[in-house]
Image: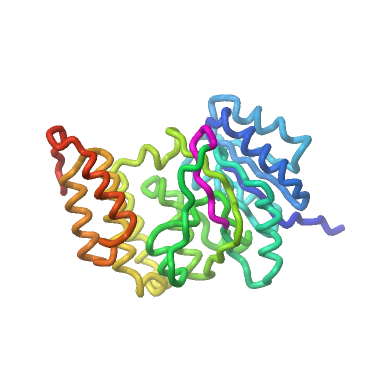
Amino acid sequence: MTVRRPFLTVVVPTFNREAHIGRCLESVVSQGFEDLQVVVVDNASTDRTVEVASSFEDRLDLTVVVNVENQERAFSRNRGAAAAAGSFILFLDSDDVLSRGALDRGVEFIRSDSSYRFVFQLPRVVNEAGTLVYEPTVGRGPMNRVLAEGNPLSCSGVYIERDLFLEHRFDESPKLVASEDWHCWIRIAADCLPVLCPGDGAVVVDHAGRTMAADRWNVAEHRFAFLTEDLLAHPEVVEFLRPNLALFLATQDHYVAVKAAGERAFRVSVVRFLRAVRRYPPLISTRRTVHLIRLWCQLPFNRVRRVNTD
């Protein structure tokens, strides 16, 4: 007898998200989309996360997998994808939610063209009170330029054919934490370009416990160095990034400049910004540079920390 395979599996990695996981899974239930499986991968939580997730077993086709020991979240996402029964996987972080109708929009879009194997919806970022913080946009130009300039895909709201994902998977190195999704999407895009699905996708809740909220400039710089070295070891990725390699490197410097400014490391910020502009001069006239200048203007210069810029 042939076992029916759901079209979509939502993979939800989680760790100590007792306060968030219920809201996340409730947003999946409220979609009213039935051709669906949900796999929650708990990363050895020490709170009630597993208990709260398991309480949805009578409302969802739900599998809860618990890691024996705490791993990087890339491990949990990979494990969830391996356990998925769906033809497509949708990644959703446990502190995020789906906007109303997101699954219907995403699946209808995928089904509209058989060549769509890698699709994403843009998220909206809100604070814990639900107030809009910002809405990411996709840059102009071809997708290799878009991904060289940053990661508009984020992770929540990315739909990918399961077999395609399992060919690539997230790199589980601790050195990539906070950029493992960008690293993965670039590698997959060198094989199959992502396509933007119109309409809202996930709602990303910006809170102090998120990984990027604690990202420090020197940690980010070391992470980018590892990411770049690893990506450029793959010939197909080199070919993919080649037309926009200067932008790819400059984007990383600019990100570090912004982080350093936020940490009052003014000299580091200026040095990284100047290096970014040398690599890719058009960055000087972007909104991100306007934001950086505003950060500099807010610095109490008599109290700016002196740090090693090496």
Task: Find the residue positioned furthest to the right.
Answer: 1
Q: Is residue 155 left or right of residue 234?
A: right
- State the image coordinates of residue 280 (x, y, percent, origin top left): 26, 66
Residue at x 41% of width, y 46% of height:
177
Residue at x 26% of width, y 46% of height:
294
Residue at x 62% of width, y 45% of height:
98
Q: Is residue 308 left or right of residue 117?
A: left
Quadrant of image for the N terminus: bottom right
In depth, the one of 109 and 3 nearer the eye is 109
- State the image coordinates of residue 222 (x, y, percent, origin top left): 29, 49
Q: Quadrant of residue 65?
A: top right
> In the displayed structure, would residue 146 be above or below residue 213?
below
Main secondary structure of the magenta stretch: loop
Q: Is residue 225 visible?
A: no
Task: Find the residue positioned furthest to the top.
Answer: 47
Q: Is residue 111 visible?
A: yes
Residue 125 drawn in magenta:
yes
Residue at x 75% of width, y 49% of height:
33
In depth, the one of 231 and 279 nearer the eye is 279
Scheme by which the image is coloured: rainbow
Q: Which residues are magenta?
A: 121-130
- State the image coordinates of residue 256 (x, y, percent, origin top left): 28, 50
- State the image coordinates of residue 205 (x, y, percent, origin top left): 51, 39
Q: How many marks?
A: 0
In depth, the one of 233 and 20 nearer the eye is 20
Residue 148 drawn in magenta:
no
